[in-house]
Image: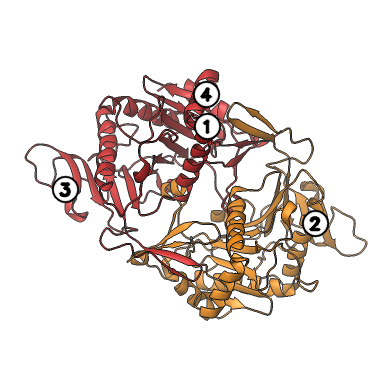
Chain colours: A red, B orange
């Protein structure tokens, strides 16, 4: 019997269609093998082909926009939003609009073309998390901005147009609808229980352990109860944290669990394409008791079509409990 | 300057990124050319390879599940939901679940393998709409069901796994989140204005006409103000109708506009893959003053990735006003 499950955080229902049950080997995922060769604007020596860097981690005494870096953040060359101008909120009849003010940046995670987040040295993954944090902290000063969505498209199927490993951020003058839904549901839960919804989810998951993928001192990775996609995995701080930030001034524990989960996915699903996104509290409500930041990782193994677009419902052919088991047993 | 636009019906914000502006010829869309040859379970003579038909339009005195039909509705061979059983709504801690009760059916729109909705005789398109209506009317009798989503995936990119032209329906024991959002926004608007939100949208669009693609006696096709995708097109009844139904006992006017829009898309975008979905009022609130049924057609020209999944925001590189103009000028 298929099962409908509700994700308590987003309010989204998912059809877990066990009759269509799939094991990892049933997913033909185009291997995300990187190839050297061809021109890459993110490789060292080509710094002049990107817009000027906003942030970089580099060897002492190397000038900006030249080689010598281990990580660069640059504006997207084809930005969806622009940073200069005013919001000019306005309406025409029933319609509302705002100027497209915001930021669209690229985090180039390493100079080495053939690496990915799962193969980089752990220190480099930590640096990527620091770059996220520094950019969030900087963009928060802009009073026009309400939210920064940090995300990663890994592999062409997942929307990456350049294969050199990178993340992106889009800063918005509006809190996005999906984040707003999560905030609202969490707030409603808090109002009734005086507890954080995601803290309760984590406690329940750690207690039953069947959907726990991995844990370390500060973080846990779970296959969400109402996973939209096979092998969807969330990484969350175990203790209540409303906004993305280091723990004890360090990202080493987060880098550790994130990279291990990505290694497990690579192992179980043969280097699948995936998207991940960081969900954190909006700028004006960064410190709160009800929302709990986390990273959502979605391997792109199934096609989304008219049903998903039309309904916001998802059909998932793999039980999250089974996905978690495969992940736990992966030898990485 | 890019523009943020809000869709008043769903509450969804969209980035109209004019700097990335694209004309129809910039979209490389895999031509949806149908090929004869190979086994097709939807072709006449192969009726025994599908589950038994639920509805068919066929020549007099031809037996069910054999040739002689012009349209068939059959259960999906790999259904996401099943019709037998009880809902057994239950919770485990913070999680809610329901048995996967519902229906998953396929509407085979014609016996002719090489046709599509845009090339079929108009009468056949009318019959497809009648089939939708008959199935909705029948499924509504099942008190366990709350909503039926009718949708079409045209082309492999849009999720069609068989090329023989067909639509699908999924009947659900839950009103889907996206439909619920549209209902809630429409209801809120009605509570404040005593008018249907979509009626107001239609009046404003007909008044300015710059986003009107096409109209006939009873229906209008528009490029929505906050289109998520290039060439997104909605077909709506001009007068208030809360639920999908014939007008004057006929679907000829709807078949006419729907087919013309699909022909325009084929012409402008060289037979693109697309999804469409029918949004209508849920079963328990079918007749109401606030919601207005419509069909949403989404050509699949751009990739959706981490940003869209993480935010519910969309980036659209084509102005809806320009898309509407290209559509109007298409010689079909």
Res B37 → quadrant: bottom right
> Counting residues from the N terminus, which is met first, the one under dot 1 or under dot 3?
3
Residues A265 and B103: in front is B103
Residue highlighted by disc 3: A45
Q: Secondary structure at mark 4?
A: helix
Task: Kindly identify which numbered label has been placed on residue B137.
Answer: 2
Residue highlighted by disc 4: A205
**Does the rendering let one see residue A151?**
no
Q: Secondary structure at mark 1?
A: loop
Gap between marks 1 and 2 measured at Cα: 36 Å
Task: Give the quadrant of the C terminus of chain A.
Answer: top left
**Does the rendering let one see residue B184?**
yes
Pointer 3 chain: A
Task: Kindly identify which numbered label has been placed on residue A224.
Answer: 1
Pointer 4 chain: A
Q: Are marks 1 and 2 on the same chain?
A: no
> Counting residues from the N terminus, which is met first, the one under dot 4 or under dot 3?
3
Pointer 2 chain: B
> Counting residues from the N terminus, which is met first, the one under dot 1 or under dot 4?
4
């Amino acid at each position: 019997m298929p099962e409908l499950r509700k994700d308590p955080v987003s309010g989204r229902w998912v059809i877990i269609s066990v009759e269509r049950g799939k094991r990892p080997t049933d997913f033909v995922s185009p291997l995300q093998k990187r190839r050297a060769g061809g021109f890459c604007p993110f490789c060292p020596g080509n710094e002049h082909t990107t817009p000027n860097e906003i942030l970089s981690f580099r060897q002492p005494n190397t000038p900006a926009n030249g080689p010598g870096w281990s990580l660069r953040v640059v504006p997207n060359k084809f930005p969806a939003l622009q940073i200069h101008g005013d919001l000019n909120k306005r309406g025409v009849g029933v319609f509302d609009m705002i100027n497209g003010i915001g930021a669209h940046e690229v985090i180039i995670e390493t100079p080495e073309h053939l690496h990915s987040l799962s193969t980089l040295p752990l220190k480099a993954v930590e640096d990527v998390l620091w770059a996220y944090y520094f950019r969030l902290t900087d963009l928060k000063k802009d009073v026009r901005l309400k939210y920064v969505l940090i995300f990663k498209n890994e592999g062409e199927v997942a929307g990456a147009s350049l294969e050199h490993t990178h993340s992106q951020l889009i800063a918005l003058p509006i809190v996005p609808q999906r984040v707003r839904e999560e905030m609202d549901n969490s707030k409603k839960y808090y109002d009734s229980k005086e507890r954080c919804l995601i803290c309760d989810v984590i406690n329940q998951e750690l207690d039953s352990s069947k959907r726990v993928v991995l844990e370390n001192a500060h973080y846990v990775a779970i296959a969400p109860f109402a996973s939209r996609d096979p092998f969807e995995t969330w990484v969350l701080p175990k203790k209540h944290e409303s906004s993305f930030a280091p723990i004890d001034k360090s990202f080493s524990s987060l880098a550790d669990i994130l990279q291990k989960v990505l290694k497990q996915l690579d192992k179980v699903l043969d280097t699948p394409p995936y998207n991940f996104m960081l969900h954190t509290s909006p700028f004006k409500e960064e410190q709160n008791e009800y929302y709990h930041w986390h990273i959502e990782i979605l391997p792109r193994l199934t096609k989304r079509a008219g049903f998903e677009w039309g309904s916001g419902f998802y059909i998932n052919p793999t039980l999250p409990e089974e996905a978690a088991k495969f992940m736990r047993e992966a030898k990485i």
